[in-house]
Amino acid sequence: MNIKVIYKKNISRVIINEPKTYNSLSFKNLNDLIKVFKKLDSDTSVKVIILEGAGKGFSAGHNLKEVRGLKKKEKYQKLFNLCSKLMLQIVEGKKPVIAKVHGAAYAAGCQLVASCDLAYSTKDALFATPGVNIGLFCSTPMVAVSRKISRKPMMKMLLTGEPIKANYAKEIGLINDCFSKSKLSNEVLKIAQKIASKSNLTIKIGKQTFYKQLEMPLRKAYAYTSKMMTINMMAMDAKEGISAFLEKRKPIWKNK
């Protein structure tokens, strides 16, 4: 398997470990990532997932040698459907996923970053939707990226294919923050630990609710989130959290 998983307490690191193809999202790697995310999603000991790439960078997107060899329409459709399945698995999964980016995150690699709940990078990281340079518009990557950044910077990335630097990616909301190479791991771990210290039942309800309400008209969104807040309020952890706050003590989560 080209996907490495490292467990440390309740945080799991998922590493795309194929530096020779710049961690390409080949059929094999996509299938393996889907399997890993599904497994971690049902693992009650895992509270947060960190996604990263081995070698020089995060991911250059699809493996173009593989893509060139597909030739048939059905095979292309299968590849893009599989890639979309991975992105949906990350978004619809129960656990928060943090992208930890160094080097380049291009095309479907950039899509992968945008699909994660949070994203942090090194200061020299680059992000691009460069499909236009090879006659292939980044239509599936733009689904994820355009839901994180606004239209004008998105269209510039898509129409020019030019990479953007980490500080600008932060400015437009593609990533949360960028750090020096020496600090990135520690900073990402700090965020992961902070999230892991919360009730994972609450996080699960909240993550699902966040993405669903984004797609709804305002009135429907309020009706839906009121319902979800009520479901959340009935959980033991909400009662414990409120009691702990009022009693000025640390909550003891039961994740129920």
Image (cartoon, rainbow, N blue to C red):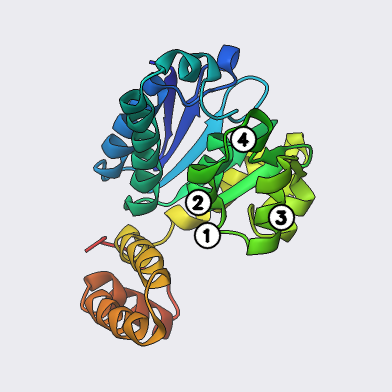
Quadrant (top left, top right, bottom left, bottom right) of the N terminus: top left
Q: CA distance from mark 3 to mark 4?
A: 22 Å
Which type of secondary structure does the marked residue at label 1 adopt? loop
Q: Nearer the viewer, residue 44 or 80?
A: 80
- Which residue in the protein does label 4 denote? 131
Q: Amino acid at mark 2?
A: Ala
Q: Which residue is mark 1?
A: 147
Q: SS class of the residue under badge 3? A: helix
Give the CA distance from mark 3 to mark 1. 15 Å
- Residue type at mark 3 is Lys
Residue denoted by label 3: 170
> Crowding at label 2, few (<14), some or many (≥20) Cα neighbours within 10 Å?
many
Pointers 3 and 1 in contact (C-beta within 8 Å): no
Task: Answer yes or no: is residue 58 visible.
Answer: yes
Residue 158 rendering spot, x and y as whole percentages: 65, 47
Q: Nearer the viewer, mark 4 or mark 1?
A: 4
Crowd around label 3: few <14 · some 14–19 · many ≥20 (10 Å): some
Kindly report the distance in space between the C-alpha atoms of the residues bearing marks 4 and 2.
15 Å
Neighbour class for label 4 at 10 Å: few (<14), some, many (≥20)? many
Q: Amino acid at mark 4?
A: Gly
